[in-house]
Amino acid sequence: MTQFFETTQGIMLVGAMIGAGCFAAGTIIPSVLRWTAAERGLNPKAKARSAAMLTALALDDFVGAAYAAVHDTPEFNPVNEGEFVFHTADPVLVLPRAEDLSLLGDELFHEALWLSNRVTNLGNALDNLDLSGPGFDSFFERRQEGYAVIAAKAMDLIERLLADFDLSLPEKPDYYRQRDGFASVVQAAGERSNGIKKTAARVPTPGSNVTHLFPKTGEEGE
Protein backbone atom coordinates (compact mmCIF):
# COMPACT_ATOMS: atom_id res chain seq x y z
CA MET A 1 0.00 0.00 0.00
CA THR A 2 2.78 2.44 0.85
CA GLN A 3 4.42 1.80 -2.50
CA PHE A 4 1.51 3.59 -4.21
CA PHE A 5 2.39 6.88 -2.50
CA GLU A 6 5.92 6.59 -3.86
CA THR A 7 4.63 6.73 -7.45
CA THR A 8 3.89 9.90 -9.35
CA GLN A 9 0.16 9.34 -9.05
CA GLY A 10 0.47 8.82 -5.29
CA ILE A 11 2.50 11.97 -4.82
CA MET A 12 -0.04 13.95 -6.84
CA LEU A 13 -2.91 12.51 -4.76
CA VAL A 14 -1.21 13.43 -1.49
CA GLY A 15 -0.59 16.95 -2.80
CA ALA A 16 -4.21 17.28 -3.81
CA MET A 17 -5.37 16.12 -0.37
CA ILE A 18 -3.08 18.61 1.39
CA GLY A 19 -4.29 21.39 -0.85
CA ALA A 20 -7.93 20.54 -0.20
CA GLY A 21 -7.27 20.44 3.53
CA CYS A 22 -5.62 23.83 3.51
CA PHE A 23 -8.50 25.26 1.50
CA ALA A 24 -11.04 23.85 3.94
CA ALA A 25 -9.09 25.15 6.91
CA GLY A 26 -8.82 28.56 5.31
CA THR A 27 -12.57 28.63 4.82
CA ILE A 28 -13.73 27.16 8.14
CA ILE A 29 -11.29 28.72 10.61
CA PRO A 30 -12.16 32.37 9.80
CA SER A 31 -15.86 31.50 10.13
CA VAL A 32 -15.22 29.90 13.51
CA LEU A 33 -13.21 32.90 14.64
CA ARG A 34 -15.97 35.29 13.55
CA TRP A 35 -18.58 33.21 15.39
CA THR A 36 -16.46 33.14 18.55
CA ALA A 37 -15.93 36.89 18.39
CA ALA A 38 -19.67 37.43 17.98
CA GLU A 39 -20.38 35.19 20.95
CA ARG A 40 -17.88 37.10 23.05
CA GLY A 41 -19.52 40.37 22.05
CA LEU A 42 -22.98 39.16 23.07
CA ASN A 43 -21.84 37.34 26.20
CA PRO A 44 -21.52 40.40 28.49
CA LYS A 45 -25.05 41.52 27.61
CA ALA A 46 -26.42 38.05 28.22
CA LYS A 47 -24.60 37.83 31.54
CA ALA A 48 -25.88 41.24 32.60
CA ARG A 49 -29.44 40.24 31.72
CA SER A 50 -29.11 37.03 33.72
CA ALA A 51 -27.72 38.97 36.68
CA ALA A 52 -30.64 41.41 36.45
CA MET A 53 -33.12 38.53 36.52
CA LEU A 54 -31.44 36.91 39.52
CA THR A 55 -31.41 40.25 41.34
CA ALA A 56 -35.06 40.94 40.57
CA LEU A 57 -36.06 37.49 41.84
CA ALA A 58 -34.02 37.95 45.03
CA LEU A 59 -35.66 41.33 45.63
CA ASP A 60 -39.09 39.87 44.92
CA ASP A 61 -38.48 37.13 47.50
CA PHE A 62 -37.56 39.80 50.03
CA VAL A 63 -40.68 41.82 49.20
CA GLY A 64 -42.86 38.76 49.77
CA ALA A 65 -41.19 38.04 53.12
CA ALA A 66 -41.49 41.69 54.13
CA TYR A 67 -45.19 41.73 53.24
CA ALA A 68 -45.77 38.71 55.48
CA ALA A 69 -43.78 40.30 58.31
CA VAL A 70 -45.55 43.64 58.04
CA HIS A 71 -48.95 41.98 58.32
CA ASP A 72 -47.92 39.52 61.02
CA THR A 73 -49.63 39.98 64.39
CA PRO A 74 -47.45 38.90 67.32
CA GLU A 75 -48.75 36.32 69.73
CA PHE A 76 -48.20 37.14 73.42
CA ASN A 77 -47.61 34.71 76.24
CA PRO A 78 -50.74 34.89 78.47
CA VAL A 79 -48.60 34.08 81.49
CA ASN A 80 -45.99 36.72 80.72
CA GLU A 81 -47.12 39.62 78.55
CA GLY A 82 -43.51 40.63 78.04
CA GLU A 83 -42.95 37.53 75.92
CA PHE A 84 -44.19 37.36 72.35
CA VAL A 85 -43.50 35.49 69.14
CA PHE A 86 -44.05 36.25 65.46
CA HIS A 87 -45.50 33.73 63.06
CA THR A 88 -43.04 34.67 60.31
CA ALA A 89 -39.28 35.18 60.41
CA ASP A 90 -37.62 38.54 59.82
CA PRO A 91 -37.19 39.25 56.10
CA VAL A 92 -33.71 38.53 54.73
CA LEU A 93 -32.35 39.94 51.47
CA VAL A 94 -29.96 37.51 49.76
CA LEU A 95 -28.52 39.17 46.66
CA PRO A 96 -26.43 37.51 43.93
CA ARG A 97 -22.63 37.66 44.15
CA ALA A 98 -20.94 41.04 43.88
CA GLU A 99 -19.29 40.12 40.57
CA ASP A 100 -22.74 39.38 39.14
CA LEU A 101 -24.24 42.59 40.52
CA SER A 102 -21.41 44.61 38.98
CA LEU A 103 -22.69 43.58 35.53
CA LEU A 104 -25.78 45.72 36.15
CA GLY A 105 -23.81 48.95 35.94
CA ASP A 106 -22.55 51.19 38.72
CA GLU A 107 -25.87 52.86 39.55
CA LEU A 108 -27.97 49.70 39.91
CA PHE A 109 -25.07 47.90 41.58
CA HIS A 110 -24.80 50.59 44.25
CA GLU A 111 -28.56 50.79 44.76
CA ALA A 112 -28.77 47.04 45.36
CA LEU A 113 -25.96 47.17 47.92
CA TRP A 114 -27.51 50.25 49.54
CA LEU A 115 -30.81 48.44 49.91
CA SER A 116 -29.12 45.41 51.45
CA ASN A 117 -27.36 47.68 53.92
CA ARG A 118 -30.67 49.29 54.91
CA VAL A 119 -32.12 45.88 55.73
CA THR A 120 -29.13 45.14 57.95
CA ASN A 121 -29.33 48.55 59.64
CA LEU A 122 -33.03 48.12 60.39
CA GLY A 123 -32.42 44.74 62.01
CA ASN A 124 -29.62 46.17 64.12
CA ALA A 125 -31.74 49.14 65.17
CA LEU A 126 -34.66 46.93 66.20
CA ASP A 127 -32.33 44.71 68.21
CA ASN A 128 -31.21 47.73 70.22
CA LEU A 129 -34.69 48.84 71.28
CA ASP A 130 -35.63 48.48 74.96
CA LEU A 131 -38.46 45.95 74.85
CA SER A 132 -38.87 46.13 78.61
CA GLY A 133 -40.03 49.75 78.41
CA PRO A 134 -43.60 51.03 78.02
CA GLY A 135 -45.16 49.93 74.76
CA PHE A 136 -42.08 47.83 73.97
CA ASP A 137 -40.36 51.06 72.89
CA SER A 138 -42.65 51.15 69.81
CA PHE A 139 -40.90 48.02 68.56
CA PHE A 140 -43.87 46.67 66.62
CA GLU A 141 -44.67 49.98 64.94
CA ARG A 142 -41.04 50.62 64.02
CA ARG A 143 -40.62 47.09 62.66
CA GLN A 144 -43.77 47.28 60.59
CA GLU A 145 -43.04 50.70 59.12
CA GLY A 146 -39.35 49.96 58.58
CA TYR A 147 -39.88 46.84 56.50
CA ALA A 148 -42.75 48.45 54.59
CA VAL A 149 -40.56 51.38 53.52
CA ILE A 150 -37.62 49.20 52.47
CA ALA A 151 -39.87 46.74 50.63
CA ALA A 152 -41.49 49.59 48.69
CA LYS A 153 -38.04 50.76 47.61
CA ALA A 154 -37.17 47.19 46.63
CA MET A 155 -40.23 47.14 44.39
CA ASP A 156 -39.04 50.37 42.75
CA LEU A 157 -35.67 48.77 42.07
CA ILE A 158 -37.34 45.67 40.61
CA GLU A 159 -39.30 47.83 38.19
CA ARG A 160 -36.10 49.54 37.05
CA LEU A 161 -34.35 46.22 36.47
CA LEU A 162 -37.25 44.84 34.49
CA ALA A 163 -37.48 47.98 32.35
CA ASP A 164 -33.73 48.39 31.73
CA PHE A 165 -33.14 44.74 30.78
CA ASP A 166 -36.51 44.00 29.14
CA LEU A 167 -37.49 41.35 31.67
CA SER A 168 -40.70 40.27 33.37
CA LEU A 169 -41.60 38.42 36.54
CA PRO A 170 -44.31 35.79 36.89
CA GLU A 171 -47.76 37.30 37.43
CA LYS A 172 -49.21 37.45 40.92
CA PRO A 173 -52.85 37.08 41.97
CA ASP A 174 -54.91 40.26 41.58
CA TYR A 175 -55.78 40.30 45.26
CA TYR A 176 -52.10 40.17 46.27
CA ARG A 177 -51.50 43.92 46.10
CA GLN A 178 -48.20 44.29 47.86
CA ARG A 179 -47.54 47.94 46.99
CA ASP A 180 -50.98 48.99 48.24
CA GLY A 181 -50.40 47.08 51.46
CA PHE A 182 -47.05 48.76 52.09
CA ALA A 183 -48.46 52.19 51.25
CA SER A 184 -51.32 51.79 53.74
CA VAL A 185 -48.87 50.76 56.47
CA VAL A 186 -46.64 53.78 55.85
CA GLN A 187 -49.66 56.09 55.72
CA ALA A 188 -51.00 54.71 59.00
CA ALA A 189 -47.58 55.19 60.59
CA GLY A 190 -47.51 58.82 59.45
CA GLU A 191 -50.98 59.48 60.80
CA ARG A 192 -50.07 57.83 64.08
CA SER A 193 -46.93 59.97 64.34
CA ASN A 194 -48.87 63.16 63.60
CA GLY A 195 -51.49 62.20 66.19
CA ILE A 196 -48.82 61.75 68.83
CA LYS A 197 -47.31 65.13 67.98
CA LYS A 198 -50.70 66.89 68.15
CA THR A 199 -51.53 65.21 71.45
CA ALA A 200 -48.19 66.26 72.90
CA ALA A 201 -48.77 69.84 71.74
CA ARG A 202 -52.19 69.96 73.46
CA VAL A 203 -50.93 68.68 76.81
CA PRO A 204 -50.43 71.72 79.10
CA THR A 205 -47.18 72.04 80.95
CA PRO A 206 -47.92 71.35 84.60
CA GLY A 207 -47.20 74.21 87.01
CA SER A 208 -44.63 73.80 89.72
CA ASN A 209 -45.85 73.04 93.26
CA VAL A 210 -42.59 74.27 94.75
CA THR A 211 -42.99 77.19 97.18
CA HIS A 212 -40.49 79.84 96.26
CA LEU A 213 -38.50 81.24 99.13
CA PHE A 214 -37.90 84.52 97.34
CA PRO A 215 -40.45 86.64 95.47
CA LYS A 216 -40.30 86.46 91.63
CA THR A 217 -39.05 89.47 89.80
CA GLY A 218 -39.32 90.69 86.21
CA GLU A 219 -40.76 88.18 83.75
CA GLU A 220 -40.77 85.41 86.35
CA GLY A 221 -43.34 87.30 88.37
CA GLU A 222 -45.80 87.65 85.47
Image: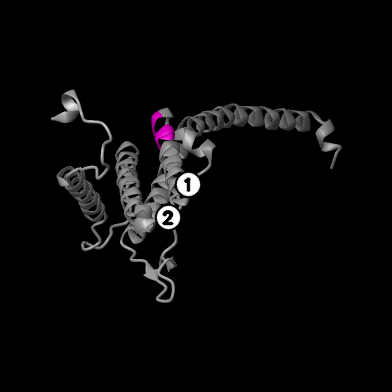
- Label 1 element class: helix
Left or right: where does residue 65 sit relative to residue 26? Answer: left
Q: Nearer the viewer, residue 66 or 176?
A: 66
**Dots 2, 1 in contact, CB < 8 A:** no
Coordinates of residue 108 in the picture (x, y in percent): 39, 34
Amino acid on which the number 1 mark rests in the picture? Asn
Residue wearing tag 2 = 91
At a point 37% along the width and 53% down the height, the residue shown is 137
Is residue 64 something one can see in this rendering?
A: no
- Using the numbered discs, state the Cα–Cα distance from disc 2 to disc 1 in whole angstroms: 13 Å
At a point 44% along the width and 61% down the height, the residue shown is 89
Mark drawn on residue 103: none
Task: State whether residue 18 is above or below residue 153.
Answer: above
Mark drawn on residue 124: 1
Coordinates of residue 123 in the picture (x, y in percent): 45, 49
Observer-side mark, 2 or 1, equals: 1
